[in-house]
Image (spheres, coloured by chain):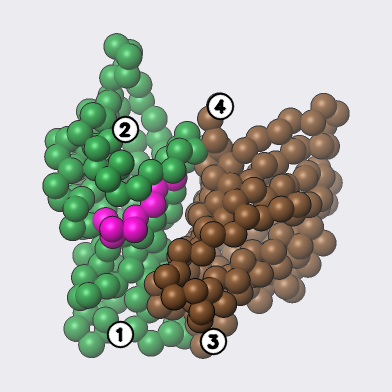
Chain colours: A green, B brown
Amino acid sequence: MRSLLSIALLVCAGMPASYAQQDSDSDAGSKIVAMEHVWAQAYTVKDPRALARILDDSFICVASDGRQLNKAQVMADVKTSAVLQVLTEPMVVHLHGDTAIVSGTFRTKGMEHGKPFARRERFVDTWLYKNGTWVSLTTMVTLAAD
Amino acid sequence: MKTTGCLLMLVCAVFIRVRAQDGGQRGGTAAAILGLEHTRYNAESRGDRRALDQIFDDALVLVEDGLLATKGECLARVQSAGARPRQIVAETATVRIFGGTAIVVGTYREIDIGDGKPIPKRYRFIDTWVNKKGSWMLVGAGAAPISK
């Protein structure tokens, strides 16, 4: 996985951020991107424990095949994932007060039913600043078309 | 999906499930959010850029058919010429409220009716709305095709 990514942080005006007293926008964006990397790494090492802190209890995932998964299902999916490698690509964070929208793409490689696969997928994640930390509320993943 | 401009969208039925526990104020908010979803559908079907401009945040991030689109690109598509008509049937929608943030998760069916034989597809979507100065704005949206 890439060690560092180029991060474009776009701060949207018009809404006061309650987290701003403790956290600058750039810090918030960096923290969120760092957690995105932890998330990707969890799939590579098949260890869902880190996701317990990152994903909100009400977390919802829409996978690239259209399945809807909750937090427990995602964590279980990590353990049995066919993914062997996740390469994240540059992502963009849009801050809207206590809410952040992160979009980007990533590449996965793995083995499924004895056959190797490689995919490039695009995602949109929603994060919420809650109880002093950022947690992910949703992710929507679909096969990238470009 | 919503990649072409002149759209024929028919929202036939939406089964609303509001996750808000208190049912009162949050239920009202959820209903308002769903109203905005309908406003969006109707505005797209009419090619009403002005209406969409009012509910699309300037930093809107939209993922459709695996492509990323900005607010400007979305509005341009609505008005683009030569688009194929399509029919969209909303199926389910669940709203979750987190203070000034609302998440809508649901499904819809789309029938492309512009190229002879209609081709139906089903999608599952997630929309994120944020309350800005009293108005709910769409800040993030995406949909993935549902595999059979």
Identify the subunit bearing mark 4.
B
Q: Nearer the viewer, residue B104 or B47?
A: B104
> Which chain is indicated by disc 2?
A
Q: Is residue B26 above or below residue A105?
A: below
* Residue B116 falls within the magenta-colored stretch: no
Instruction: State left or right for residue B132 relative to residue B40.
Output: left
Q: Going 54% across and 87% down the picture, which residue do you hit?
A: B134
Q: In the depicted view, which residue is nearer to us: A70 or B70?
A: A70
**Circle 4 is placed at which residue position?**
B148
Specify the amino acid type for callout 2. Thr
Q: Are marks 4 and 1 on the same chain?
A: no
| Residue A141 in view here | no
Q: Earlier in the sequence, mark 1 or mark 2?
A: 1
Which one is closest to the eye, mark 3 or mark 2?
A: 3
Per the model, the C-alpha gap separating discs 3 and 2 is 41 Å
Identify the disc placed on residue B85. none
Q: Mark 1 — residue?
A: A18
The mark closer to the camera, 2 or 4, is: 4
Q: Secondary structure at mark 2?
A: strand
- Label 4 SS: loop
Q: B118 left or right of A64?
A: right
Label 4 amino acid?
A: Lys
Q: Mark 1 to mark 2: distance in Å?
A: 36 Å
Part of the protein shown in magenta: A55-62
Q: Are marks 1 and 3 on the same chain?
A: no
Pointer 3: what residue? Answer: B134
Mark 2 sits on what residue? A108
Q: Which element is circle 1 on?
A: helix
Is label 2 on the same chain as label 4?
Answer: no
Query: In the image, is A44 to the left or to the right of B54?
Result: left
Reply above or below: A45 against A123: above
